[in-house]
Image (cartoon, grey):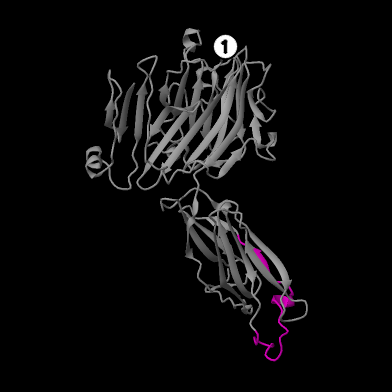
Amino acid sequence: DDVWVYINDKLALDLGGVHKVAEGSITLNQRTATNLGLEPNGIYKFDMYHAERHFSESNFRITTTLAAACNVERSGSTKFDLNGAGVSVANLLLSPVSAFANGGIQLISPGSVGPASAFAWLREGINVGTGFQADFTFVLEEGENHEGFAVVLQNRPDRLENLPISFGSNLGFRFITHSIAIVVDTCADRDTGSCSEQTIRIHHPDNLGDENSARDATRRRFSSIHRSLKLRNEPHTLRIEYIYIDNPFKTYLEVYLDNSLFLRMDDFNIEDVLGARSAFFGFTSSVGDATGAITISDLLIRDVTVSSRNTEALSLDGPVSVPADGESKAEFKVRTRDRCNNVIQFGGVNQMKAIFIEELPPLGAGRLLKQDQRTYANNSLVPAQIVAPIIDNEDGSYSAILQTETVAGFSLYICFGEGCDIIVTLNDAGVGAAGLQAADVTFNDAALNQFSQKIENAAQATFVSVRPTASPTTFTPTEPED
Protein backbone atom coordinates (compact mmCIF):
# COMPACT_ATOMS: atom_id res chain seq x y z
CA ASP A 1 0.00 0.00 0.00
CA ASP A 2 0.92 3.64 -0.36
CA VAL A 3 0.37 5.95 2.61
CA TRP A 4 1.16 9.64 2.80
CA VAL A 5 0.46 11.97 5.73
CA TYR A 6 0.41 15.75 5.39
CA ILE A 7 0.26 18.10 8.36
CA ASN A 8 -0.28 21.80 7.73
CA ASP A 9 -0.08 21.00 4.00
CA LYS A 10 3.49 19.70 4.43
CA LEU A 11 4.53 16.09 3.83
CA ALA A 12 5.16 14.55 7.25
CA LEU A 13 5.25 10.82 6.41
CA ASP A 14 5.97 9.12 3.07
CA LEU A 15 5.36 5.37 2.68
CA GLY A 16 4.72 5.53 -1.04
CA GLY A 17 6.12 3.34 -3.80
CA VAL A 18 6.63 -0.40 -4.21
CA HIS A 19 7.85 -1.88 -0.94
CA LYS A 20 7.51 -4.75 1.48
CA VAL A 21 6.07 -4.27 4.96
CA ALA A 22 7.07 -0.79 6.06
CA GLU A 23 6.45 1.37 9.11
CA GLY A 24 6.67 5.06 9.83
CA SER A 25 5.86 7.39 12.69
CA ILE A 26 5.53 11.09 13.43
CA THR A 27 6.46 12.53 16.80
CA LEU A 28 5.25 16.09 17.26
CA ASN A 29 8.25 17.37 19.20
CA GLN A 30 9.71 20.84 18.92
CA ARG A 31 11.91 19.96 15.96
CA THR A 32 9.03 18.39 14.01
CA ALA A 33 6.74 21.28 14.88
CA THR A 34 9.31 23.77 13.56
CA ASN A 35 9.72 21.84 10.31
CA LEU A 36 5.95 21.69 9.81
CA GLY A 37 5.35 25.30 10.81
CA LEU A 38 3.30 24.46 13.91
CA GLU A 39 2.77 26.75 16.90
CA PRO A 40 1.37 25.80 20.34
CA ASN A 41 -2.45 25.95 20.53
CA GLY A 42 -2.70 26.36 16.77
CA ILE A 43 -5.29 24.62 14.57
CA TYR A 44 -3.86 22.73 11.58
CA LYS A 45 -4.99 20.37 8.84
CA PHE A 46 -4.19 16.66 9.05
CA ASP A 47 -4.53 14.84 5.70
CA MET A 48 -3.86 11.15 5.19
CA TYR A 49 -3.90 9.45 1.78
CA HIS A 50 -4.00 5.70 1.20
CA ALA A 51 -3.85 3.84 -2.12
CA GLU A 52 -4.51 0.11 -2.65
CA ARG A 53 -1.64 -1.11 -4.84
CA HIS A 54 -2.25 -4.88 -4.75
CA PHE A 55 -5.37 -7.06 -4.84
CA SER A 56 -4.19 -9.29 -1.96
CA GLU A 57 -2.28 -8.77 1.28
CA SER A 58 -3.04 -5.09 0.95
CA ASN A 59 -3.62 -3.59 4.37
CA PHE A 60 -2.33 -1.04 6.83
CA ARG A 61 -2.78 -0.09 10.48
CA ILE A 62 -2.76 3.26 12.22
CA THR A 63 -2.23 3.95 15.92
CA THR A 64 -2.25 7.47 17.34
CA THR A 65 -2.23 9.42 20.59
CA LEU A 66 -4.09 12.34 18.99
CA ALA A 67 -7.04 13.44 21.11
CA ALA A 68 -10.35 14.70 19.80
CA ALA A 69 -10.37 18.44 19.18
CA CYS A 70 -11.75 20.14 22.26
CA ASN A 71 -13.56 22.75 20.22
CA VAL A 72 -15.52 20.22 18.16
CA GLU A 73 -18.35 18.44 19.96
CA ARG A 74 -20.16 16.10 17.61
CA SER A 75 -22.83 15.45 20.23
CA GLY A 76 -23.84 19.08 20.26
CA SER A 77 -27.16 20.68 21.02
CA THR A 78 -29.87 19.42 18.69
CA LYS A 79 -31.31 22.17 16.49
CA PHE A 80 -33.67 20.01 14.45
CA ASP A 81 -34.54 16.33 14.49
CA LEU A 82 -36.87 15.07 11.76
CA ASN A 83 -37.61 12.04 13.95
CA GLY A 84 -38.24 14.18 17.03
CA ALA A 85 -41.48 14.18 18.97
CA GLY A 86 -44.07 16.55 17.59
CA VAL A 87 -42.37 17.10 14.23
CA SER A 88 -44.96 17.23 11.45
CA VAL A 89 -45.64 18.76 8.08
CA ALA A 90 -46.34 22.02 9.95
CA ASN A 91 -42.58 22.35 10.51
CA LEU A 92 -41.93 22.34 6.77
CA LEU A 93 -42.63 24.52 3.76
CA LEU A 94 -43.15 22.14 0.82
CA SER A 95 -43.49 22.68 -2.91
CA PRO A 96 -46.51 21.17 -4.73
CA VAL A 97 -44.44 18.17 -5.90
CA SER A 98 -43.05 17.50 -2.39
CA ALA A 99 -44.60 15.69 0.56
CA PHE A 100 -44.02 14.64 4.16
CA ALA A 101 -44.86 10.96 4.59
CA ASN A 102 -43.71 8.02 6.71
CA GLY A 103 -41.43 10.26 8.76
CA GLY A 104 -39.46 11.41 5.70
CA ILE A 105 -39.41 14.26 3.21
CA GLN A 106 -40.30 13.23 -0.31
CA LEU A 107 -38.53 16.04 -2.11
CA ILE A 108 -40.05 14.73 -5.30
CA SER A 109 -42.95 12.51 -4.36
CA PRO A 110 -43.81 9.39 -6.38
CA GLY A 111 -46.01 10.11 -9.37
CA SER A 112 -45.17 13.84 -9.48
CA VAL A 113 -45.72 15.51 -12.81
CA GLY A 114 -43.14 17.98 -14.14
CA PRO A 115 -41.73 20.29 -15.06
CA ALA A 116 -41.59 21.96 -11.65
CA SER A 117 -39.16 23.29 -9.06
CA ALA A 118 -39.11 21.13 -5.92
CA PHE A 119 -38.21 22.29 -2.42
CA ALA A 120 -38.63 21.50 1.26
CA TRP A 121 -37.61 24.15 3.82
CA LEU A 122 -37.52 24.11 7.61
CA ARG A 123 -39.79 26.95 8.69
CA GLU A 124 -37.56 27.99 11.61
CA GLY A 125 -34.12 29.53 11.06
CA ILE A 126 -31.07 27.80 12.55
CA ASN A 127 -27.82 29.27 13.86
CA VAL A 128 -25.16 27.85 11.54
CA GLY A 129 -22.48 30.54 11.54
CA THR A 130 -20.55 29.26 14.54
CA GLY A 131 -20.51 25.59 13.66
CA PHE A 132 -23.04 22.88 12.83
CA GLN A 133 -23.35 19.31 11.66
CA ALA A 134 -26.22 18.08 9.48
CA ASP A 135 -26.76 14.35 8.85
CA PHE A 136 -29.45 12.69 6.75
CA THR A 137 -30.18 9.68 4.59
CA PHE A 138 -31.35 9.98 0.99
CA VAL A 139 -32.71 7.51 -1.57
CA LEU A 140 -32.90 8.22 -5.28
CA GLU A 141 -35.45 6.07 -7.05
CA GLU A 142 -33.78 3.65 -9.44
CA GLY A 143 -33.68 4.92 -13.00
CA GLU A 144 -32.63 8.02 -14.87
CA ASN A 145 -35.65 10.22 -14.25
CA HIS A 146 -34.15 12.75 -11.85
CA GLU A 147 -30.95 14.74 -11.72
CA GLY A 148 -30.07 15.08 -8.03
CA PHE A 149 -30.71 17.68 -5.35
CA ALA A 150 -29.11 20.51 -3.38
CA VAL A 151 -28.90 21.29 0.32
CA VAL A 152 -29.30 25.05 0.62
CA LEU A 153 -28.62 27.47 3.48
CA GLN A 154 -30.11 30.89 2.79
CA ASN A 155 -30.80 34.19 4.50
CA ARG A 156 -32.77 36.01 1.79
CA PRO A 157 -34.41 39.31 2.78
CA ASP A 158 -37.76 37.67 1.88
CA ARG A 159 -36.83 34.54 3.87
CA LEU A 160 -39.33 31.90 2.70
CA GLU A 161 -41.59 34.26 0.79
CA ASN A 162 -41.57 34.57 -3.01
CA LEU A 163 -39.06 31.76 -3.48
CA PRO A 164 -37.47 31.75 -6.96
CA ILE A 165 -37.90 28.82 -9.35
CA SER A 166 -35.19 27.20 -11.47
CA PHE A 167 -34.63 23.99 -13.42
CA GLY A 168 -31.92 21.84 -14.97
CA SER A 169 -28.35 22.07 -13.69
CA ASN A 170 -29.40 24.64 -11.09
CA LEU A 171 -31.47 21.98 -9.29
CA GLY A 172 -33.84 24.55 -7.84
CA PHE A 173 -31.27 26.79 -6.10
CA ARG A 174 -30.57 29.35 -8.84
CA PHE A 175 -31.58 32.97 -8.12
CA ILE A 176 -31.51 32.41 -4.33
CA THR A 177 -29.48 35.26 -2.83
CA HIS A 178 -27.51 35.12 0.46
CA SER A 179 -27.11 31.37 0.00
CA ILE A 180 -24.73 28.45 -0.21
CA ALA A 181 -25.71 25.22 -1.99
CA ILE A 182 -24.18 21.78 -1.41
CA VAL A 183 -25.12 19.91 -4.57
CA VAL A 184 -25.42 16.18 -5.24
CA ASP A 185 -25.67 16.18 -9.03
CA THR A 186 -26.42 12.80 -10.62
CA CYS A 187 -26.63 14.26 -14.13
CA ALA A 188 -23.49 16.40 -14.34
CA ASP A 189 -23.19 15.65 -18.06
CA ARG A 190 -26.78 16.70 -18.85
CA ASP A 191 -25.53 18.80 -21.74
CA THR A 192 -24.60 15.61 -23.59
CA GLY A 193 -27.93 13.96 -22.80
CA SER A 194 -26.34 10.85 -21.23
CA CYS A 195 -26.94 11.74 -17.55
CA SER A 196 -24.32 9.30 -16.29
CA GLU A 197 -21.71 11.48 -14.51
CA GLN A 198 -22.06 12.37 -10.81
CA THR A 199 -20.49 15.20 -8.82
CA ILE A 200 -20.65 16.79 -5.39
CA ARG A 201 -20.26 20.56 -5.56
CA ILE A 202 -20.41 23.63 -3.36
CA HIS A 203 -21.83 26.82 -4.90
CA HIS A 204 -22.01 30.31 -3.44
CA PRO A 205 -22.13 33.85 -4.88
CA ASP A 206 -18.90 35.81 -4.85
CA ASN A 207 -20.53 38.91 -3.38
CA LEU A 208 -23.05 39.28 -0.57
CA GLY A 209 -26.55 39.63 -2.03
CA ASP A 210 -25.72 38.17 -5.46
CA GLU A 211 -27.79 35.31 -6.84
CA ASN A 212 -26.55 31.74 -6.60
CA SER A 213 -26.16 29.71 -9.78
CA ALA A 214 -24.71 26.44 -10.99
CA ARG A 215 -22.78 28.23 -13.74
CA ASP A 216 -21.91 31.69 -12.42
CA ALA A 217 -21.26 31.21 -8.70
CA THR A 218 -17.98 30.17 -7.14
CA ARG A 219 -17.85 26.41 -6.82
CA ARG A 220 -15.77 23.50 -5.59
CA ARG A 221 -16.34 20.04 -6.97
CA PHE A 222 -15.52 16.37 -6.59
CA SER A 223 -16.21 14.32 -9.71
CA SER A 224 -15.09 10.77 -8.93
CA ILE A 225 -18.27 9.19 -7.57
CA HIS A 226 -18.02 5.93 -9.48
CA ARG A 227 -20.87 3.95 -7.91
CA SER A 228 -24.25 5.09 -9.11
CA LEU A 229 -26.34 6.81 -6.43
CA LYS A 230 -29.47 5.64 -8.28
CA LEU A 231 -28.74 1.92 -8.03
CA ARG A 232 -31.44 -0.42 -6.67
CA ASN A 233 -32.99 2.28 -4.46
CA GLU A 234 -30.01 2.13 -2.10
CA PRO A 235 -29.96 4.45 0.93
CA HIS A 236 -26.97 6.80 1.15
CA THR A 237 -25.88 9.09 3.96
CA LEU A 238 -24.71 12.67 3.63
CA ARG A 239 -23.04 14.73 6.35
CA ILE A 240 -22.34 18.44 6.07
CA GLU A 241 -20.06 19.78 8.79
CA TYR A 242 -19.02 23.38 9.33
CA ILE A 243 -16.32 23.96 11.94
CA TYR A 244 -15.71 27.52 13.10
CA ILE A 245 -12.78 28.56 15.29
CA ASP A 246 -12.78 32.19 16.36
CA ASN A 247 -9.25 32.76 17.65
CA PRO A 248 -7.18 32.17 15.65
CA PHE A 249 -9.76 32.32 12.86
CA LYS A 250 -10.15 29.01 11.05
CA THR A 251 -13.08 27.32 9.31
CA TYR A 252 -13.72 24.04 7.55
CA LEU A 253 -16.75 23.14 5.45
CA GLU A 254 -16.74 19.39 4.80
CA VAL A 255 -19.07 17.07 2.90
CA TYR A 256 -19.14 13.33 3.63
CA LEU A 257 -20.91 10.82 1.40
CA ASP A 258 -21.47 7.39 2.98
CA ASN A 259 -19.01 8.29 5.78
CA SER A 260 -16.20 9.22 3.37
CA LEU A 261 -14.92 12.79 3.03
CA PHE A 262 -15.55 13.90 -0.54
CA LEU A 263 -15.16 17.67 -0.45
CA ARG A 264 -13.69 20.31 1.85
CA MET A 265 -13.35 24.09 1.78
CA ASP A 266 -10.93 25.81 4.18
CA ASP A 267 -11.09 29.36 5.53
CA PHE A 268 -14.59 29.87 4.22
CA ASN A 269 -16.79 32.05 6.42
CA ILE A 270 -20.46 31.20 5.92
CA GLU A 271 -21.46 34.50 7.52
CA ASP A 272 -19.77 36.39 4.66
CA VAL A 273 -22.15 34.65 2.21
CA LEU A 274 -25.32 34.60 4.31
CA GLY A 275 -24.89 38.05 5.82
CA ALA A 276 -25.76 36.61 9.24
CA ARG A 277 -25.11 33.62 11.47
CA SER A 278 -28.58 32.20 11.10
CA ALA A 279 -30.13 30.70 7.98
CA PHE A 280 -33.04 28.70 6.68
CA PHE A 281 -32.10 25.09 5.93
CA GLY A 282 -33.72 23.35 2.97
CA PHE A 283 -33.54 20.95 0.05
CA THR A 284 -34.16 21.87 -3.58
CA SER A 285 -34.36 19.99 -6.86
CA SER A 286 -36.06 20.29 -10.23
CA VAL A 287 -38.44 18.00 -12.04
CA GLY A 288 -38.58 17.33 -15.76
CA ASP A 289 -41.43 15.77 -17.69
CA ALA A 290 -40.52 12.30 -16.37
CA THR A 291 -39.87 12.16 -12.63
CA GLY A 292 -38.25 9.88 -10.12
CA ALA A 293 -38.80 10.08 -6.37
CA ILE A 294 -36.19 11.54 -3.98
CA THR A 295 -36.68 10.76 -0.29
CA ILE A 296 -34.87 12.44 2.62
CA SER A 297 -35.03 10.83 6.08
CA ASP A 298 -33.34 10.89 9.51
CA LEU A 299 -32.41 14.57 9.20
CA LEU A 300 -30.53 15.67 12.33
CA ILE A 301 -28.95 19.11 12.70
CA ARG A 302 -26.69 19.84 15.68
CA ASP A 303 -24.46 22.71 16.68
CA VAL A 304 -21.16 22.93 18.53
CA THR A 305 -21.66 22.20 22.20
CA VAL A 306 -20.95 24.85 24.79
CA SER A 307 -19.20 23.40 27.82
CA SER A 308 -21.22 24.91 30.63
CA ARG A 309 -18.50 23.79 33.02
CA ASN A 310 -16.59 26.80 31.72
CA THR A 311 -19.47 29.21 32.17
CA GLU A 312 -18.36 32.15 34.28
CA ALA A 313 -20.15 34.91 36.13
CA LEU A 314 -19.48 38.36 34.73
CA SER A 315 -21.84 40.52 36.78
CA LEU A 316 -23.80 38.51 39.33
CA ASP A 317 -22.86 40.55 42.39
CA GLY A 318 -25.61 42.28 44.32
CA PRO A 319 -27.43 44.15 45.44
CA VAL A 320 -28.36 46.05 42.31
CA SER A 321 -30.91 48.79 42.81
CA VAL A 322 -33.70 49.19 40.26
CA PRO A 323 -36.79 51.44 40.36
CA ALA A 324 -40.00 49.40 40.69
CA ASP A 325 -41.62 51.05 37.69
CA GLY A 326 -41.98 47.99 35.47
CA GLU A 327 -39.70 49.54 32.85
CA SER A 328 -36.25 50.01 34.38
CA LYS A 329 -33.93 47.02 34.12
CA ALA A 330 -31.47 45.25 36.40
CA GLU A 331 -29.04 43.13 34.38
CA PHE A 332 -27.09 40.04 35.48
CA LYS A 333 -24.61 38.55 33.04
CA VAL A 334 -22.76 35.25 32.49
CA ARG A 335 -20.34 34.22 29.73
CA THR A 336 -19.88 30.78 28.17
CA ARG A 337 -16.70 29.14 26.93
CA ASP A 338 -15.96 25.90 25.09
CA ARG A 339 -13.69 23.12 26.32
CA CYS A 340 -10.68 24.99 24.91
CA ASN A 341 -11.70 27.98 27.05
CA ASN A 342 -12.55 30.01 23.95
CA VAL A 343 -15.54 32.32 24.14
CA ILE A 344 -18.49 30.75 22.29
CA GLN A 345 -20.76 32.99 20.23
CA PHE A 346 -23.41 30.58 19.03
CA GLY A 347 -26.83 31.65 20.23
CA GLY A 348 -27.18 29.50 23.35
CA VAL A 349 -29.92 31.68 24.79
CA ASN A 350 -32.26 28.68 25.05
CA GLN A 351 -29.83 26.94 27.44
CA MET A 352 -30.00 29.65 30.09
CA LYS A 353 -32.74 30.09 32.68
CA ALA A 354 -33.10 32.56 35.52
CA ILE A 355 -35.78 33.29 38.16
CA PHE A 356 -35.99 36.17 40.62
CA ILE A 357 -37.64 35.20 43.94
CA GLU A 358 -38.94 37.85 46.34
CA GLU A 359 -37.17 37.89 49.71
CA LEU A 360 -39.02 38.17 53.02
CA PRO A 361 -38.42 41.62 54.55
CA PRO A 362 -36.13 41.53 57.60
CA LEU A 363 -37.69 41.35 61.07
CA GLY A 364 -37.98 44.78 62.62
CA ALA A 365 -38.50 46.63 59.35
CA GLY A 366 -40.95 49.49 59.64
CA ARG A 367 -44.08 48.55 61.61
CA LEU A 368 -42.78 45.07 62.46
CA LEU A 369 -40.60 46.20 65.33
CA LYS A 370 -42.41 44.36 68.13
CA GLN A 371 -43.84 41.20 66.68
CA ASP A 372 -43.21 38.95 63.70
CA GLN A 373 -46.22 39.46 61.45
CA ARG A 374 -44.18 39.78 58.27
CA THR A 375 -45.71 39.40 54.81
CA TYR A 376 -44.42 39.94 51.32
CA ALA A 377 -45.12 43.07 49.30
CA ASN A 378 -48.79 44.13 49.13
CA ASN A 379 -49.47 41.89 52.18
CA SER A 380 -49.05 38.78 50.03
CA LEU A 381 -48.45 35.43 51.75
CA VAL A 382 -46.45 34.06 48.79
CA PRO A 383 -43.28 35.49 47.29
CA ALA A 384 -43.28 37.02 43.83
CA GLN A 385 -41.62 34.81 41.21
CA ILE A 386 -40.34 36.58 38.11
CA VAL A 387 -39.00 34.49 35.23
CA ALA A 388 -36.20 36.56 33.73
CA PRO A 389 -36.04 37.27 30.00
CA ILE A 390 -32.65 36.13 28.61
CA ILE A 391 -30.76 38.41 26.22
CA ASP A 392 -28.07 37.10 23.85
CA ASN A 393 -25.40 39.83 23.80
CA GLU A 394 -23.77 38.13 20.77
CA ASP A 395 -20.34 38.29 22.36
CA GLY A 396 -20.46 34.96 24.18
CA SER A 397 -22.38 36.43 27.12
CA TYR A 398 -26.03 36.23 28.15
CA SER A 399 -28.01 38.52 30.46
CA ALA A 400 -30.90 37.84 32.82
CA ILE A 401 -33.15 40.90 33.14
CA LEU A 402 -35.32 41.99 36.09
CA GLN A 403 -38.23 44.36 35.51
CA THR A 404 -40.88 44.69 38.21
CA GLU A 405 -43.40 46.95 39.91
CA THR A 406 -43.04 45.07 43.21
CA VAL A 407 -41.09 47.01 45.84
CA ALA A 408 -38.99 44.28 47.44
CA GLY A 409 -35.63 42.58 47.55
CA PHE A 410 -35.01 39.63 45.21
CA SER A 411 -32.70 36.64 45.13
CA LEU A 412 -31.53 35.37 41.75
CA TYR A 413 -31.35 31.72 40.72
CA ILE A 414 -29.58 31.12 37.41
CA CYS A 415 -28.42 28.08 35.43
CA PHE A 416 -26.85 27.42 32.03
CA GLY A 417 -26.57 24.09 30.21
CA GLU A 418 -28.60 21.84 27.95
CA GLY A 419 -31.57 20.61 29.98
CA CYS A 420 -30.96 22.95 32.90
CA ASP A 421 -34.05 23.87 34.89
CA ILE A 422 -34.99 25.69 38.08
CA ILE A 423 -37.64 24.06 40.30
CA VAL A 424 -39.58 26.18 42.81
CA THR A 425 -41.80 24.72 45.55
CA LEU A 426 -43.59 26.63 48.31
CA ASN A 427 -43.60 25.51 51.95
CA ASP A 428 -44.72 26.94 55.28
CA ALA A 429 -42.24 29.66 56.17
CA GLY A 430 -42.48 28.89 59.90
CA VAL A 431 -42.19 32.60 60.66
CA GLY A 432 -44.22 35.74 60.01
CA ALA A 433 -47.95 35.96 59.51
CA ALA A 434 -50.12 32.85 59.58
CA GLY A 435 -49.98 30.97 56.27
CA LEU A 436 -46.81 32.69 55.08
CA GLN A 437 -45.04 30.62 52.41
CA ALA A 438 -41.32 30.38 51.63
CA ALA A 439 -39.76 29.33 48.33
CA ASP A 440 -37.62 26.19 48.22
CA VAL A 441 -35.52 26.36 45.03
CA THR A 442 -33.51 23.51 43.51
CA PHE A 443 -31.70 22.94 40.20
CA ASN A 444 -32.39 20.04 37.86
CA ASP A 445 -29.69 17.44 38.58
CA ALA A 446 -30.29 15.73 35.23
CA ALA A 447 -28.59 18.52 33.31
CA LEU A 448 -24.99 17.50 32.63
CA ASN A 449 -22.16 19.91 33.34
CA GLN A 450 -24.58 22.70 34.03
CA PHE A 451 -23.60 25.99 35.60
CA SER A 452 -25.93 27.01 38.43
CA GLN A 453 -25.76 29.66 41.10
CA LYS A 454 -27.88 31.37 43.75
CA ILE A 455 -27.28 35.06 44.44
CA GLU A 456 -28.96 36.26 47.60
CA ASN A 457 -30.01 39.90 47.81
CA ALA A 458 -29.24 40.25 44.09
CA ALA A 459 -31.60 43.16 43.44
CA GLN A 460 -33.55 45.72 45.39
CA ALA A 461 -36.59 47.18 43.64
CA THR A 462 -37.15 50.60 45.16
CA PHE A 463 -40.22 52.76 45.60
CA VAL A 464 -40.84 55.29 42.84
CA SER A 465 -41.99 58.60 44.27
CA VAL A 466 -44.81 60.42 42.51
CA ARG A 467 -43.86 63.91 41.51
CA PRO A 468 -46.57 66.59 41.68
CA THR A 469 -47.73 68.02 38.40
CA ALA A 470 -46.08 71.35 37.70
CA SER A 471 -48.29 74.44 37.58
CA PRO A 472 -49.07 75.79 34.13
CA THR A 473 -46.62 78.42 32.99
CA THR A 474 -48.10 81.77 32.01
CA PHE A 475 -47.27 82.56 28.41
CA THR A 476 -46.26 86.09 27.71
CA PRO A 477 -46.15 86.97 24.03
CA THR A 478 -43.03 88.79 22.94
CA GLU A 479 -44.74 90.48 20.02
CA PRO A 480 -48.10 92.31 19.88
CA GLU A 481 -50.99 90.27 18.53
CA ASP A 482 -51.74 90.72 14.82
Identify the magenta region: 363-388
Q: Residue furthest right?
A: 434
For the N terminus, give its image quadrant: top left
Seen in the image, is 261 located left or right of residue 295? left
Residue 132 in the image, given as x and y percentages of width and height? 50, 40
Dot 1 corresponds to which residue?
Answer: 144
Residue 329 in the image, given as x and y percentages of width and height? 56, 66
Q: Residue furthest bottom?
A: 370
Q: Is residue 440 depicted above or below 165 in this figure?
A: below
At a point 68% along the width and 40% down the height, the residue shown is 85
The reply to whether residue 176 is visible in this rendering is no
Q: Nearer the viewer, residue 274 or 27?
A: 27
Residue 82 image-quadrant placement: top right
The reply to whether residue 437 is visible in this rendering is yes
Tell me the kind of residue under disc 1.
Answer: Glu
Q: Nearer the viewer, residue 80 or 467?
A: 80
Seen in the image, is 263 located left or right of residue 289? left
Magenta stretch holds residue 381: yes
